[in-house]
Amino acid sequence: MVGIDPSPQMIETARAADGADLVEWRRLSAENWDATRDGPIDLVVTNAVLQWVPSHLDLLPRWLEALGPGGVIALQVPGNMQAPAHALMREVASTHPRAAELVPALNRARASADPTDYVRVLVGAGFEADAWETTYMHLLSGEHDEHPVLSWVRSTGLRPVRQILTEEEFVEFTSEYERRLRQAYPEEPFGVALPFRRVFAIGRRTGSVSESVSAVVGIDHVQVACAAGDEDVQRGFYAGVLGMTEIPKPPILAARGGAWFASGQAVIHVGVEADFSPARKAHPCLLVPDIDEIARRVRAAGHPVTWDDAIPGIRRFHTHDGVGNRIELQER
Ligand SMILES: C[S@@+](CC[C@H](N)C(=O)[O-])C[C@H]1O[C@@H](n2cnc3c(N)ncnc32)[C@H](O)[C@@H]1O
């Protein structure tokens, strides 16, 4: 894994957070990253960076070339250049005695594009593309007398102005800019509302995964179904009879009902299905160390045990779970 940023402080902060030393940190601008030398790459993630790289729409195709089969790029850039916070900064710059330096610097900086631009680049390179925008509502409260939007842009959008002007000129500039910000972003009982548009894009290289790399590495779980309200019957079978452990469902999924069970490497998800009817043919096959013991328990709980010796050397039987789904048990 490689992480790049031209700022030494940013690299140090990132390195400190990388306790397990998983990443090779490089002090480098995006423009100077030779992606092809690091390829084939599985994933490129860039967050709130490309707005500082005016040429990035031309840079992206080189990065895309370096992505391997199934490779993904995910990017996020602020898309707020037309917002009053930036428009007013350009306005003040355009009437400033040093407008000839300030205006081009502000136009060059923070060159994000629109979702369509990113889709164009991604699709043009043969990628599956998805792009969208979201406007986040930040509620700011000032800690000092300074207007909170001015504090917000000091370390970002105002940087080019700070780099050009003298200290005295900068104070003058910000005081006029702040006057306009106060009108555009008034103080309200809840603070100052700052809508902030961000643009997102994801691209995935289509086509088959290299033959030498298996695309599937295992089974996470198998799902079986039941009718709404039959979860307890299923608990009786999977936990009670088979001795699996119920594991909590993620809260967002728990509202849908159902129950999850795990034991060893086996995970069964019981899901609730409208118009449920038991699966008579399709079934999971669970491995058990002592099939006779399980057969005894299954029978004692009132479930059928149908032995099958069609495969020589394999001891297995079929039964059904609490709601009639076919289940196979096989001795490992
Ligand atoms: C808003 S921060 C985002 C940092 C980090 N990506 C994150 O999500 O926390 C913007 C970063 O862009 C970096 N940056 C500025 N110009 C850059 C360039 N030309 N290439 C790469 N990174 C750049 C800055 O050093 C800064 O760390």
Image: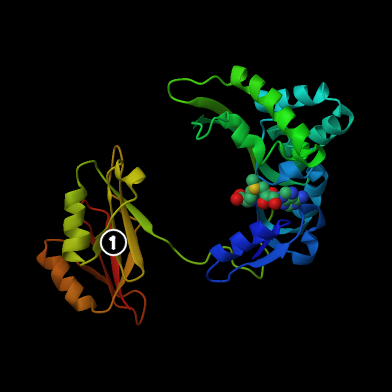
**Which quadrant, please, contains the N terminus?**
bottom right
Q: Is mark 1 within 8 Å of ligand 1?
A: no
Point out the residue furthest to the bottom here: 313
Residue 68, given in percent of the width and then of the height, sits at: 71, 60
Tell me the quarter of the picture where residue 262 sits.
Answer: bottom left
Residue 83 picture location, percent across and down: 66, 25
Vertical side of 276 occupied by 31: above or below: below
Q: What scheme was used to colour the molecule?
A: rainbow
Quarter of the picture containing the C terminus is bottom left
Visible in this render: residue 38?
yes
Please name the residue that numbered disc 1 is placed on.
327
Numbered disc total:
1
Observer-nearest of 188 and 319: 188
Residue 168, picture quadrant: top right
The answer to whether residue 132 is visible is no
Residue at screen point 19% across, 56% down: 235
Instruction: Name the amino acid type tagged 1.
Output: Ile
Q: Secondary structure at mark 1?
A: strand
Looking at this view, is 208 or 250 the one in front?
250
Q: Quadrant of residue 199?
A: top right
Which residue is situated farthest in the right direction here?
Answer: 100
Q: Where's residue 142, x and y in %?
A: 51, 32
The vertical placement of 95 against 111, above or below, is above
Which residue is located at x 32 percent, y 46 percent?
A: 251
Q: Nearer the viewer, residue 162 or 326?
A: 162
Is 63 located above or below residue 195 in the figure? Answer: below
Q: Residues within 10 Å of mark 1 (few under 14, many from 20)?
A: some
State the image coordinates of residue 175 (x, y, percent, origin top left).
68, 26
Does 236 sit above or below residue 18? Answer: above
